[in-house]
Amino acid sequence: MGLLDKVKAQATQVAGRAQEAGRAGQAKLEEVQAKRRIDALLRELGEAVYAEQTGGGSAGSGAVARLVDEIRAAKADQDAAYAREVAQGEGGGPDEAGDGGQDAATDDAGES
């Protein structure tokens, strides 16, 4: 029965890892969806501000205020999704090192 117990324990471990990977994938998906929503809202905000500044918009500042509120809410959702991702051990956010994506390779290029 020892072999059967070992197989059963391994199967339980594999199932646990699969569930963990699924949760991490879901958190990453939520983060990406929130980023796309923010990008769309920012574009819409830019269009509204441009229309307002050039006199071509009839929506007025009400549309700008509404879009700013929606962007704030979407950013909060994105932050929450990222926090869930980090909590599940996935990490790897867009700027985890805090260097804007610049690393030693780009620093070395200027030293030649």
Image: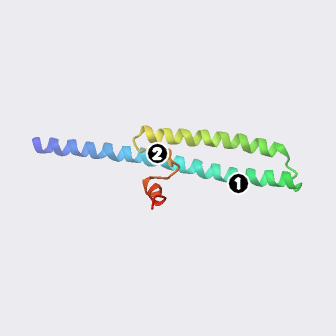
How many marks can you see?
2
Q: Who is closer to the viewer here, 51 or 7?
A: 51
Render colour scheme: rainbow
Q: Is residue 52 left or right of residue 81?
A: right
- The mark nearer the N terminus, 1 or 2, is 1
Looking at numbered disc 2 in the image, what kind of residue is underneath it? Ala
Q: Are marks 1 and 2 in contact (CB under 8 Å)?
A: no
Q: Is residue 43 left or right of residue 10?
A: right
Q: Who is closer to the viewer here, 104 or 74?
A: 104
**Residue 19's quadrant in the figure?**
top left
Q: Who is closer to the viewer here, 63 or 8?
A: 63
Looking at numbered disc 1 in the image, what kind of residue is underneath it? Arg
Closest to the camera, between mark 1 and mark 2, is 2
Q: Position of residue 51 (x, y in %)?
A: 83, 55
Residue drawn at x 32%, y 45% as measured from the top left: 17
Q: Is residue 110 above or below residue 93?
A: below
Outermost residue, front side: 112
Residue picked out by circle 2 = 97
Q: Quadrant of the C terminus?
A: bottom left
Q: CA distance from mark 1 to mark 2?
A: 27 Å
On the question of residue 105 being in view, the answer is yes
Outermost residue, bottom side: 112
Q: Who is closer to the viewer here, 20 or 47?
A: 47
Q: Is residue 1 left or right of residue 53?
A: left
Q: Is residue 63 left or right of residue 26?
A: right
How many C-alpha atoms fall within 10 Å of the one at disc 1: few (<14), some, or many (≥20)? few
> Residue 29, labelled with which disc?
none
Q: Is residue 106 above or below residue 60?
A: below
Is label 2 in a helix, a strand or a loop? loop
Residue picked out by circle 1 = 43
